[in-house]
Image (cartoon, helix red, strand yellow):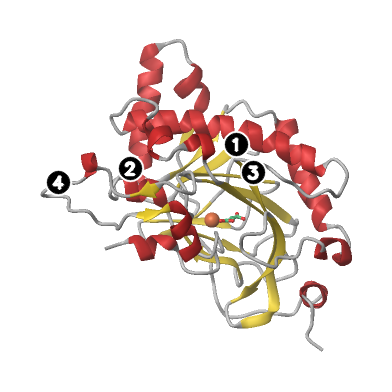
Amino acid sequence: MAKTASVILTQNLSDTKRTTSFNHSANDDEIPTIDYSMLICSNDPDQRLKALQYLAYVCKEYGFFYLVNHGVPDSVIERALNGISDFFNLTEEEKMDYEKKDSTDRIRWGLGFSPGDHEAVKREYLKVLPHPKFEGPAKPAGFREALEDYYQRDREVIINLAKAVSKTLGFEENYLEKEFELETGADVSAMNVYPLGFKPNTQIGLPAHYDPGYLVSLVQNVNGGLQLNYKQKWINVDMPSNALFINIGDHVEVLTNGKYKSPMHRVILNNEVRRVSVATVHGPSLDTFVKPGPEFVGESHPPAYRGMIYKDSLEANGYHEIDGKSCIAQLRL
Ligand SMILES: O=C(O)CCC(=O)C(=O)O
Ligand SMILES: [Fe+2]
């Protein structure tokens, strides 16, 4: 009889002996910090301008940053993370109600494996679609409400950040909202938990990939594991506990014809504490045709990406099945 995902999970999580000779350690170089309160809320125009100029530099140079003073209450983030942890603690039978049957399921639970090894679970995830219409799991009690609260606050921050990013590109603040038709923007959120018991820095929890969408936000209960690729080197994410981690998504890279790039990242199994994360991909509306904007194309800058309807590019990417092929590789000309 075929083993169910949950049987494999139980077997794997109790297996503490797997090691390989890989070393996936990384540097602790600085990751830039953007102060949201200065960028968005400051009454001092000079301060706002300076913050905007720094954001322009960070988007072009890095494509990822810590966002502090964002105004999402710690309690909202904590309740969501605790709810996620409680969801993953449900019995396997209960979680099977949400087992992924199709990539378009609105709620889907599943396991991530090592490439080519369907015994070694490296990640357990739950994916939901927070926008335009949120639906969350009915259990455990209070989880859906905690998630809804978090996604609402997170999206407010991201929309304001999209306005600031529009300005860094030299446009009026609604540029990205209009280009990507964000009123009906399609957000996908992956909640992840990574298994314990592997020798640190030897195992990949989530293989190197790029995220679709325009901006991606991430919160976690503990540092350790997420690494960003910067100038061909891996850097450890080591963020203040109340920060959001933000990265540029593939579709801003396409729209700006490569001016702002979507950074490659991965997760290494590293922790003695169980690590839970929420990565929310904020995307254009599903019907939006995303192509390099005419302002970013010229004789010296021929289009470097093909245009594609957002939904089609997600399908090409297995609906944010990030263990599969990145859509950016398929969009590059
Ligand atoms: O768990 C993490 O830290 C990263 C997750 C991630 O990159 C994703 O879900 O796309
Ligand atoms: Fe990712």
**Where in the figure is residue 328, as x and y percent of width and height?**
39, 60
Task: Please name which of the two marks, 3 or 2, marks the residue nearer to the observer.
Answer: 3
In this rendering, position of residue 198 left or right of residue 261: right
Label 1, on which residue? 243
Q: What's under tag 3, amino acid-wise?
A: Pro
Q: Who is closer to the viewer here, 276 or 80? A: 80
As displayed, is residue 164 above or below residue 291? above
Q: CA–CA distance between discs 3 and 2?
A: 28 Å
Q: Earlier in the sequence, mark 3 or mark 2?
A: 2
**Where in the figure is residue 76, as x and y percent of width and height?**
73, 33
**Where in the figure is residue 226, as x and y percent of width and height?**
57, 56
Task: Please name which of the two marks, 1 or 3, marks the residue nearer to the observer.
Answer: 3
As displayed, is residue 21 above or below residue 135? below
Q: Earlier in the sequence, mark 1 or mark 4?
A: 1
Q: Quadrant of ligand 2?
A: bottom right
Q: Which mark is residue 316?
A: none
Mark 1 Cα shell of 10 Å, populated few (<14), some (14-19), many (≥20): many
Q: Earlier in the sequence, mark 4 or mark 3?
A: 3
In this rendering, position of residue 130 left or right of residue 287: right
Q: Secondary structure at mark 4?
A: loop
Q: Earlier in the sequence, mark 2 or mark 4?
A: 2
Q: Which mark is residue 130?
A: 3
Q: CA–CA distance between discs 4 and 3?
A: 37 Å
Q: CA–CA distance between discs 1 and 2?
A: 21 Å
Q: What's under tag 2, amino acid-wise?
A: Lys
Q: What's under tag 4, amino acid-wise?
A: Gly
Q: CA–CA distance between discs 1 and 4?
A: 38 Å
Q: Secondary structure at mark 3?
A: strand
Label 2, on which residue? 60
**Where in the figure is residue 164, as x and y percent of width and height?**
41, 28
